[in-house]
Structure formats: C-alpha cells, structure tokens
Amino acid sequence: MPIQGNLRDFSTTQLLNLINLSGRTGVLRIFEGVPTGDKDANGNEKIQPGKERAQVLFRAGKLVYASSAGQLNDLIAVLNKGGKLSEAQAKVLRERAKGTGDKALAMRLIGANYVNRNDIVACVQQYVLEIVYSVMGWNREPFRFEENVNIDAADRILVPIDLQNVIIEGARRLEKLEEISKHIDNLDLCLRFPENPKEKYAGVHLSVEEWRVVQFVNPKNTIRQIAKANNMTENDIRRIVYGLEQAGLVEIVRPTTTKPPVAASSKRAQPQVVQRQVVNRLIDKLKSLS
Amino acid sequence: MQTVKMVITGPYSSGKTEFIRSISEIDVVSTEREVTTEAERREKGATTVAMDFGRITVDDDLVLYLFGTPGQRRFDFMWEILAEGMLGFIVMVDSSKPETFREAKSILETFRAYAPTPYVVAANKQDHPEAWSPDDLRIALRIDPEVKLLPCVARDRSSVRDVLLELLYAILEEMEE
C-alpha cells in the first residue's frame, strides 16, 4: 500500500521518522504541487502531483540515495560538487565516460588514482544529504512513497545513512521556527525517554546543546525549567526539543505532578461505573450480530 | 433498565455517521444539516451538527447507546456534553486523507482529557485505494503500542462490530487492572 499525501499535512521530517521506525525499503517521490482550484476538507487549496522534483531511496529504514530533478545526479557531478574533480576534469570525464554507469566509473577512477573509495562514499553521502535537507524545507508538495521497488535496478552507488542523525541535522537546519513553535506550543510540558532508550541513542551524535537538554529529561522537569537551567532562549529549547522528538529520542508528556487541566476542572465527564457482567453481556450481544 | 454509552468521534467526514448507521438497530437519529463552506460541501453534502444517535438493545434490562460527535470543529462545545458518562470512545480516522490526521490526533487528546476511559482508534476507509495502513497510521498519529488501532470499513457491519468488540475487550482489560 503506497503512502501518499502532501507535505503540508505530513512533513518530510515526519515521513523520514515513519520510514525509520518501520524500517521500510522503497522510493519516496516528491512532486511539484499543481493547484486544482478546489479546496480540501480543511479549506486549504487542493494540490495534485505535477512533475517529479526529487526522489529519495531507502533500504531497511536507512537513507541510501537521493536525486533532484533539474540537476545532474551522476557520479561525476557528485565528485565535482564534493571538490574531488575540477570543472575541467568533470567535462573531460563526462565525454570519455559516456554510457558508463556510476559503479563502473567509480572503479575506473579509483584505479586511475583520481579518488579513493572513502572519497566517493563521503561525496555521495554529502550530495544525498544536501538534497534531503533541502527537501526537508519544502512544505506544500505532494509525495508518494512506494515499496516493492527494486532500488538496485539503476546503476547507482547506494550509501546507507542513519535517518535519526539526518532528522536531527535537518531539524537543526530548519529555519521555520514558526512551525516548531506551533508544534511545541506549550513549554510547561515535560520530556521523557522513549522505551528502549539505550537502543535509540546508540550511534546517535548529539551536539553539546542537545546533551545539555538530554541530561535534564525527566517527566518532572518542564521544558521551560530545562531552558532556564541551561540558560537557553525559548526558541533554542524549542528547536532542540523538536529535533530530539522528531528523531524519537524523547517524548513530550504532561508533568507527572499536575493533572490535565480539562480533566481536573471537569466534574461532568466522569467515566461510567459499570460491572464486568454488563460488559460481558454487551460482548455476547455484539458477537451474536451477523 | 440500565443504559451504557459509547462515543464515536473523529474529524469531519471520517465516517462516524456511517459507522453508527451500520450497526444501530434503529434508524440513526441524525442531525445532519447542509454544510456551510464550499470546501466541506465538496467532500460531503451534509454534516452532523449536534450528534448522531444509535441504539443496540441487549435485553430488557440493558441498552447500548452510540453517540457520534459533530465533525466540524465549531460544534466542539458539544463534545464534553457527549463525553459525560461514556463507557469508552472510538476515534475514527479517514485513512485516505492524511490532511485530517493532525485533527484526529487533536480530537483524541481532547477526549482523553475529558475522561480517563478506554478508547480505540479505527482506521476507517481501508477499502480505499489510497488508504494508509493501520501500522503507518499508528506512527503518523503517534499512537502508543498498547492502544488498539484497528482496520475498519464503516459501511461494513461486521467490521464495525469488530471495532466495538475490541473497545469492550479494552474496557474489560482495564477493569481487570
């Protein structure tokens, strides 16, 4: 079943998180948004997919490749952008290596001592990440994620990259603080670690600022208190908490010492007291319905 | 005679009325009115402005009432009234409309705050070609693993029955705790 929607409703960060958590293999295609002139259920302009803008490949929940429409995505372009090939070298190589796939070309370049394996891996990683960080800033494009696609079919060099780090770095770069403020609109909520924190934190690289927040994670400490303890502004703490939360490293919860305001003030919405026998009778009745 | 009540909630056009209509033994007492905005009119000709009301009679002594909440947010003043005394609630989500997921999550949190009763999430319209799978919905809506998130087709009576049964099982489990 493909996953499709619009980045306005389900952001790239959320999509990466979903793919990471569910360990998916497949291709995410992001399209230009073409307004239909209609409105959706929320009163927003309905947008249908136009030309493909970017393609991002995943294997078992890891980012492995990305390409962007309207720019060269072959190995020569990647190495050129990574500073391993000059413009002149790239031009000559492109003419000589016409019809050669990326993998074969990589072998030839390594054999000719142009580059080594690590150079290629680093350049491909950097190239892919720049595209993904750019995509993370898009906010109205239609998308479609498809599984059952042979991601090895094309002759591409696939480099696995841990999505948690991508999400954190993407969030670091995310300039849309308004959106973050909207997501974390209440600084009087608290943070807690998810289940199996050891597993989730394994291999994750946190910045000093992120570590300063992480050390205070406790359902008794509000986000505001953590900011105060670390001498951080509201915007700083929002940005850091957003990144940690989107990467699944912390969860936002109500403080353990106070009850939810609505529940505390409402005397009317008390749960009905019923006996087990009543529930069993309801179950029997429903089971008898065809 | 004892009556018990369950609430069916969820965003606009998520299938609440259809859900109750599929299982109720009486014609659903629906308070649908023509929708007022152009966008909503394209989705659906009419919407529930107060509540839907369905009934399942168990025997002479016991009746289950199903209340559907109005989908449009401007009628949310009705929600707390409907939540009063509920045995549990079901959050309907239109699996084919990701633009409504955020609203579904917000409604879920609101109802959780009204009363600490058990609830389940119904991933409705699973027969739609663009429907997100229940597993993907769980991640998208950030539903805890212990909360039941069930595939559903609201116009299919047996599917509706299964969702109601799962809610009742959740209620039993909570009683045991």
Image (spheres, rainbow, N blue to C red):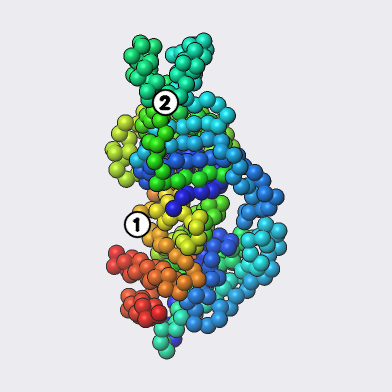
Return the x and y of residue B131 as percentages of the image width and height.
49, 56
In the displayed orientation, state which residue is furthest to the bottom.
Answer: B60
> To which quarter of the image does residue B173 belong?
bottom left
Q: Which mark is residue A101?
A: 2
Chain assignment, label 2: A
> To which quarter of the image does residue B78 belong?
bottom right
> Mark 1, mark 2: which one is toward the viewer?
2
Q: Amino acid at mark 1?
A: Glu
Helix, strand or loop under label 1: loop
Seen at 47% across and 63% down, the residue is B127
Seen at 51% across and 10% down, the residue is A88
- The front one of A154 and A161 is A154
Seen in the picture, residue A27 relative to B107 is either above or below; the reply is above
Say which residue label 1 marks.
Answer: B146
Return the x and y of residue B53 as percentages of the image width and height.
55, 76
Seen in the picture, residue A275 relative to A233 is either above or below; the reply is below
